[in-house]
Image: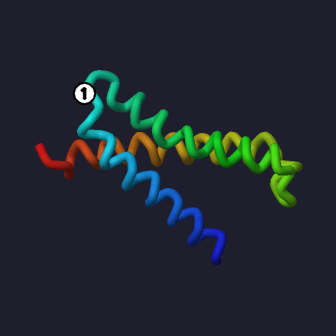
Amino acid sequence: MQRQFNLVQSTGCVGIIFAFLLPLLAEKNIYFKGWIIFLIPWWIIYLLSALAKTEGTLNLSVMTVLSNGISTSIIGLTGVYSYRIFGTK
């Protein structure tokens, strides 16, 4: 349960950072930019855990990594879509 809470908390932090960065970005390719902003922390977390050889993250299956990448992509695109609907205009 604690692990899920940490995941939700970190996703929320990325969303808050994204909400502050979005008005600074141009509208051109905004979905791509939002996808990249959400994908960068995901890659950094995987990179740091691999470099530090953190127990429990060494022998990840390809399906685990792909499903995490797909879910991060969905969250990023949903974040852009939500911001464009609910954000200030």
The image quadrant that residue 42 belongs to is top right
Residue 30 drawn at (x, y percent): 33, 30
Residue 77 drawn at (x, y percent): 41, 40
Residue nearest the observer in this picture, 81 or 27: 27
Residue 86 drawn at (x, y percent): 20, 52
Q: How crowded is mark 1: few (under 14 residues within 10 Å), some or many (20 or more)?
A: few
Q: In the structure shown, which secondary structural element does the residue marked by tag 1 occupy? A: loop
**Is 89 placed left or right of 68 in the picture?**
left
**Is 2 placed left or right of 25 in the picture?**
right
Residue nearest the observer in this picture, 79 or 14: 14
**Residue at which label 1 appears:** 27
Residue at 56% x, 47% y is 71
Colour scheme used in the picture?
A: rainbow
| Quadrant of the frame with the C terminus | top left
Residue at 24% x, 39% y is 23
Residue 78 drawn at (x, y percent): 38, 46
Q: For the view shown, which residue lies furthest in the bottom direction?
A: 1
Residue at 49% x, 57% y is 11
Q: In this view, does 41 lie above or below 25?
A: below
Q: In this view, does 89 lie above or below 55?
A: above
The image quadrant that residue 29 belongs to is top left
Number of disc labels: 1
**Is 64 placed left or right of 53 in the picture?**
left
**Is 6 placed left or right of 25 in the picture?**
right
Residue at 51% x, 66% y is 9
| Quadrant of the frame with the N terminus | bottom right
Residue type for callout 1 = Glu
